[in-house]
Amino acid sequence: TAPLLVVHDLHVDFAVPGGAVRAVRGVSFELAAGETLAVLGESGSGKSVTAQAIMGLLDPHRATVRGAVRFRGTELVGRTRAQRRREPGRRVAMVFQDALAALNPVASVGAQIAEVLRVHDGLSRRDARGRAVELMARVGIPAPDHRFDSYPHQLSGGMRQRIMIATALALGPELLIADEPTTALDVTVQAQIMQLLADLRDETGLALLFITHDLAASAELADRIAVMYAGRVVETGTAREVYASPRHPYTAGLLGSVPRVATRGRRLTPIAGSPPSPAALPSGCAFHPRCPMAQDVCTHDDPPARAIAPGHRSACHFAESVHRGGAS
Ligand code: SF4
Ligand code: MG
């Protein structure tokens, strides 16, 4: 069967004075119906920009989007906002890291969910209210009838995130894109929101594109992982395989910085250095200034992604020599 979402050779350039910044450089991946893909990377890796390009949220005066984003076979790149509100584009919904910024501060949370239902499903005011209360209950808002009239600032960060998820669910999405939905929350609440997303996925069969910098969280939630660095996907594979046997030094380095039970309390070994600015990308493999395995060839020859094993791809000249923890 055809994949639900196909992203093929996606490029996003931002216009800046005197040139263009290449934020996304040839990203490709696919997502099947009901599947969960974690897009993993540090800030500045292009993962949020990729999500915004899929959603059509980038300002066309600032950003140039090239390549393909096909949802159920329909090309979304180049579609206007109005066109996206029709099928099938409306079946893609997104939740953001900052619910306070995403929600309307001067409308009650219940009214915001009900408004989506009125616009998209043509529900009456009364039916929309009833359905909004159901959705609020579904995402774990206690006393939803009472909370319907609360304003975003009156709720905790975790409750606001649940409201944003309910607003997304009101669209009846087949694909939910979650961009670091738990990053701003404390650890206990993070786990609850992750559990909620997993439950919703399992119950409704929606596909999940989960953007995160948390490798452990992605290994737990995702079927497959796409690791991004400097605007590229440098490794893709099943979560199990990428976690157990990474085939890119960057992924191996991220794994080396994950605290495991056996090593808890020991100093972490994050990858030295920081990701490059997309405005000043290194030559060759963009990871070479930080890569413990870099050779001369890496400074001038940018490695394309290639299959290392069935369904497992890496963009490294020496992928076969990478070992878990080998980059620390
Ligand atoms: Fe490191 Fe070279 Fe592989 Fe890039 S191509 S990740 S610099 S070994
Ligand atoms: Mg981001």
Image (spheres, rainbow, N blue to C red):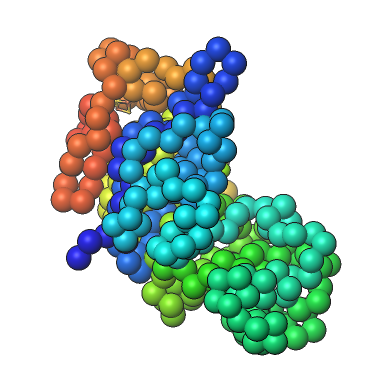
Front-most of 94 and 226? 94
Front-most of 228 and 294? 228
- Residue 287, given in percent of the width and then of the height, sits at 39, 25
Front-most of 296 and 160? 160
Q: Is residue 80 above or below residue 90?
A: above
Visible residue check, residue 91? yes
Q: Residue at x 26, y 26 (%)?
A: 303
Q: Residue at x 71, y 65 (%)?
A: 160
Q: Is residue 206 above or below residue 55?
A: below
- Residue 250, given in percent of the width and then of the height, sits at 39, 35
- Residue 241, given in percent of the width and then of the height, sits at 28, 53
Q: Residue at x 64, y 60 (%)?
A: 187
- Residue 292, given in percent of the width and then of the height, sits at 37, 25
**Residue 58 picture quarter:** top right
Seen in the image, is 149 located left or right of residue 132? right
Quarter of the image with the C terminus is: top left
- Disc tally is 0
Front-most of 149 and 283? 149
Seen in the image, is 253 located left or right of residue 240? right
Q: Is residue 231 above or below residue 148?
A: above
Seen in the image, is 285 located left or right of residue 176? left
Seen in the image, is 178 located left or right of residue 102? left
Which image quadrant shows ligand 1? top left
Visible residue check, residue 266? no
Quarter of the image with the N terminus is: bottom left
Q: Residue at x 49, y 73 (%)?
A: 172
